[in-house]
């Protein structure tokens, strides 16, 4: 790890000393299609195998590298058993003066990560996050449940002033959460089952439908949205939602704010980007699966969960080389990052603190582990603390729109995990 970060720092320094060269690109026109096999890795889901199709329409090329329409389809399976299907559409030109963004997704995940509520208040034990070995003689899925979900979102934006848009959107979702059903784990205890049995997760909240309407404003002065060199982005919205489950309706009102700034340190070579964000409950109540969460790079996806979460991220992006091949524009570079966040509004904290009697133990390779207090352990934390991680990686782009980033993250506290690897479409922010 030390060698990796030292090498990364030296490359950033070398790029800063190098004079920027003028950008030379092929202007794209008409439709451009890309169909690629997906071979990615995610700390929560494992290796991803599938296919990704993207279509960009650039028209006569006068707005390149911006596009008129974008359509993306993804179908994949993961090595830990999940199946995912997504469809995305984005355009500023479908309707005059309006931006349309639509997303549909179905996920079937038999080993969905569940790490409890309120961040550090829920203790994490790495010994209980092991997968089965090849001979299926060892392992435990303590931090897992079985997730099935389907959701559709539609967002519209319209102009209010220069760089300032109004925002309106709607979302419909269906979720179903049950115990892990894979035969090799059928007898394993899980944190999810302890939460349900203790009432921390009401039984009626494990399955239901949710409808959300939102409104807000977006300020966006970025020079190029997928990969900005400069500019500001601010999104502030209020979301009114209702969950329909077991004949009961639970209303909620949330507020979210996302601020980002992008700075060009060395033109076309070195850029700095940072993000400050918050999402929290203003009124009402939420089912556990709809709680705001922060996915810190290097940690597990829903390790930091509460009625409200806040986080900050910073990237240092180095652009190493640009070239053309097969009439396409390509770019490669490196990124270093730091993330931090916390659950700033607790969710059912008093009830969680009463569950200290729940314990779990497991024998792995003949060695007994435990008993550990699994739902709440005052020896670990009596209140939330700041979670943080650092890391780096590399990225690859085609025509400045199709961006793939591979990032390696290391949490600074073992309670958040040890090491994570992620391959994503686009930058984190």
Image (cartoon, rainbow, N blue to C red):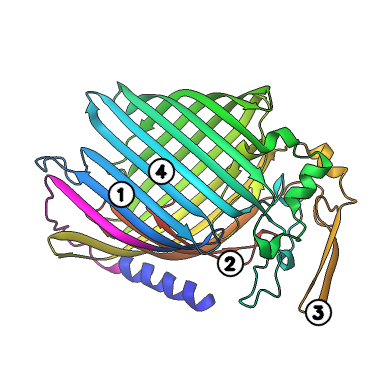
Q: Is residue 322 left or right of residue 291?
A: left
Q: Residue at x 40, y 38 (%)?
A: 103
- Identify the mark nearer the N-term, 2 or 1: 1
Q: Is residue 233 magenta?
A: no
Image: 246 above or below 193: above
Q: CA distance from mark 1 to mark 3?
A: 55 Å
- Mark 1 lies on a secondary structure that is loop
Q: On residue 336, which mark appears?
A: none
Q: Nearer the viewer, residue 197 or 333?
A: 197
Instruction: Report the magenta residues as a range.
Output: 17-38
User: How far across and down, in percent of the image, does residue 288 sit?
Assistant: 67, 38
Q: Is residue 357 left or right of residue 376?
A: right
User: How far across and down, in percent of the image, does residue 415 sit?
Assistant: 71, 60
Q: Which residue is mark 3?
A: 366
- Identify the mark nearer the N-term, 2 or 4: 4
> Label 1 crowding class (10 Å Cα cut-off): few <14, some 14-19, many 20+?
many
Q: Is residue 226 left or right of residue 341?
A: left
- Mark 2 lies on a secondary structure that is loop
Which tag is nearer the camera, tag 3 or tag 4?
Answer: 3
> Label 2 crowding class (10 Å Cα cut-off): few <14, some 14-19, many 20+?
some
Which tag is nearer the camera, tag 1 or tag 3?
Answer: 3
Specify the farthest residue to the right: 357
Q: On residue 419, which mark appears?
A: 2
Q: Which residue is mark 1?
A: 229
Query: Is there a contact, CB below 8 Å, between mark 1 and mark 3?
Result: no
């Amino acid at each position: 790890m030390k060698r990796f970060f030292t090498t990364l720092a030296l490359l950033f320094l070398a790029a800063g000393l190098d004079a920027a060269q003028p950008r030379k690109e092929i202007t794209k026109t008409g439709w451009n299609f890309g169909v690629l096999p997906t071979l990615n890795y995610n700390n929560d889901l494992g290796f991803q195998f599938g296919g990704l199709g993207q279509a960009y329409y650039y028209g006569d090329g006068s707005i390149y590298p911006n596009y008129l329409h974008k359509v993306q389809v993804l179908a994949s399976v993961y090595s830990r058993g999940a199946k995912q299907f997504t469809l995305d559409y984005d355009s500023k030109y479908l309707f005059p003066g309006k931006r349309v963004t639509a997303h549909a997704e179905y996920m079937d995940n038999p080993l969905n990560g569940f790490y409890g509520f309120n961040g550090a208040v829920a203790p994490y034990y790495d010994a209980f996050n092991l997968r089965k070995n090849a001979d299926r003689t060892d392992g435990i899925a303590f931090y897992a449940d079985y997730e099935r979900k389907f959701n559709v979102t539609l967002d519209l934006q319209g102009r209010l002033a220069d760089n300032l848009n109004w925002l309106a959107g709607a979302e419909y979702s269906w979720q179903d959460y049950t115990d892990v059903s894979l035969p090799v784990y059928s007898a394993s205890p899980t944190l999810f089952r302890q939460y349900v049995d203790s009432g921390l997760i009401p039984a009626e909240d494990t399955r239901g439908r949710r409808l959300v309407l939102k409104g807000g404003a977006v300020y966006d002065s970025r020079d190029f949205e997928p990969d900005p060199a400069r500019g500001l982005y601010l999104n502030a919205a209020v979301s009114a939602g209702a969950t329909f489950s077991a004949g009961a309706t639970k209303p909620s009102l949330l507020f979210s704010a996302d601020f980002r700034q992008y700075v060009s340190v060395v033109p076309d070579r070195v850029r700095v980007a940072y993000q400050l964000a918050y999402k929290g409950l203003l009124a009402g109540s939420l089912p556990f699966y709809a709680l705001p969460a922060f996915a810190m790079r290097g940690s597990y996806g829903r390790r930091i969960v509460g009625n409200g979460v806040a986080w900050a991220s910073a990237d240092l992006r180095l652009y190493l080389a640009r070239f053309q091949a097969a009439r396409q524009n390509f770019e490669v570079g490196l990124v270093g990052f730091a993330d931090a966040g916390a659950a700033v509004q607790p969710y059912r904290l008093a009830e969680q603190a009463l569950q200290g009697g729940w314990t779990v133990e497991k024998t792995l390779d003949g060695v007994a582990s435990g008993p550990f207090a699994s739902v709440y352990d005052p020896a670990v934390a009596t209140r939330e603390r700041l979670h943080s991680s650092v890391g780096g990686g590399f990225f690859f782009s085609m025509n400045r729109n199709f961006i793939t980033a591979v990032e390696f993250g290391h949490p600074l506290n073992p309670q958040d995990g040890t090491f994570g690897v992620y391959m994503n479409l686009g930058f984190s922010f």
